Image (tube, rainbow, N blue to C red):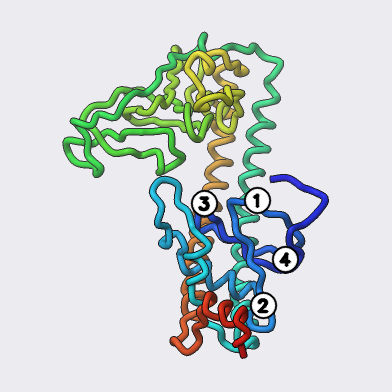
Amino acid sequence: MTYINTAVYDKPSVLIPRKGSLDKLYYVDTPFWNVDTIFYTDIDTSLVEPKYIYYYLEGQHLERLNKAGGVPSLTQAVLNKVQLPIPPLEVQREIVRILDNFTLLKAELQAELQARKKQYEYYRDSLLSKYESVSIKSIESLCKVTAGGDAPKDAMSKDKTDEYKFPIISNGVGENALYGYTNQAKIMEPAVTVAARGTIGYAEYRDYPYFPIIRLLSLIPNDTEELDTKFLYYCLQGKKYNVPTTGIPQLTAPMLKQVEIPLPNISVQRKIVGVLDNFEQICNDLNIGLPAEIEARQKQYEYYRDALLSFDNSYFVNVEREREREMSGTAD
């Protein structure tokens, strides 16, 4: 969030959310200050390695302990009753070493994927910026802009069928934008969609009939001999918008209509599209491989984590009971 000039704790700790995403744990080994929506743990390192606790709790799906309606929450009383298997310290350290190696490999793959995305964005923006000296025109003067409405609940299916074959598209990213299927499309021509809520500004090129919902904005060029639809997509891909921060943040059709884009000759637009299509294909080939590799490594990591951290009941220590024994002076 920010930085301050003091710390609440200065030893390795596992941070556990009290509210919201209860499964998003963090391991911290530098001094920190935490806000009141997250627990920190004061760990007895004579019994347990802090990072071992992190890896163990990460696989316990603490969100299942949520007893609240509305915003998920975790109380200290519930958390204190979580049982931990405590093998010898040398076993804990070996488990941590193995899982650290998996974590490092995943981080390297994520960094490679991010580097490829940045490389693509750099070349895309460089190509488009060369034409800033040509005529600049507003979206309103070049396109028809429409906003999606409600889902056709009386004529839709979650799965594609012979009758319901037109995708219903929402504001989500990638496959998450697919809401279902319906029997009639609203947009029949190639178009560019721009998310108006949630993932505001996320753009996609769509060359198939579809039914837009949840105020998803659809842009169709008035004249494809003046503005190539795919060129419009590349102009809007990754674009940032200044939207009001009060109420529900939203990009409206009138706001989008005022956006201006460079408009080189149509032959130049198509040449740019050809270059970027080829470069995007190269990146996608890498991106298809890298996410698949990351997913495979994540599954491998989870398998080894769960296998390494499976112990019989003789290893379990009830944290609350041990604390009570310490307070009563009866601890070993």
Q: What residue does disc 1 label? A: 35
Can you identify the residue that label 2 sits on? 44
Tag in front: 1 or 4: 1
Q: Secondary structure at mark 4?
A: loop
What distance separates the C-alpha of mark 1 from that of mark 2? 22 Å
What residue do we see at 64% from left, 83% from top? 47
State whether residue 104 appears in this view. Answer: no
Q: Residue most toward the front?
A: 328
- Distance (Cα) linking label 3 and label 2: 25 Å
Q: Residue at x 50, y 25 (%)?
A: 250
In the rendered image, the residue lying farthest to the top is: 141
Tell me the number on the disc at residue 19.
Answer: 3
Instruction: Please tell me which of labels 1 and 3 falls first in the chain.
Output: 3
**152 vs 111: above or below:** above
Q: Earlier in the sequence, mark 2 or mark 4?
A: 4
On the rendered image, what quadrant is the N terminus found in?
Answer: top right
The amino acid on which the numbered mark 1 sits, given as a three-letter code, is Val
Q: Is residue 256 above or below residue 158?
A: above
Mark-to-mark CA distance, 1 and 4: 17 Å
* Residue 29 marker: 4
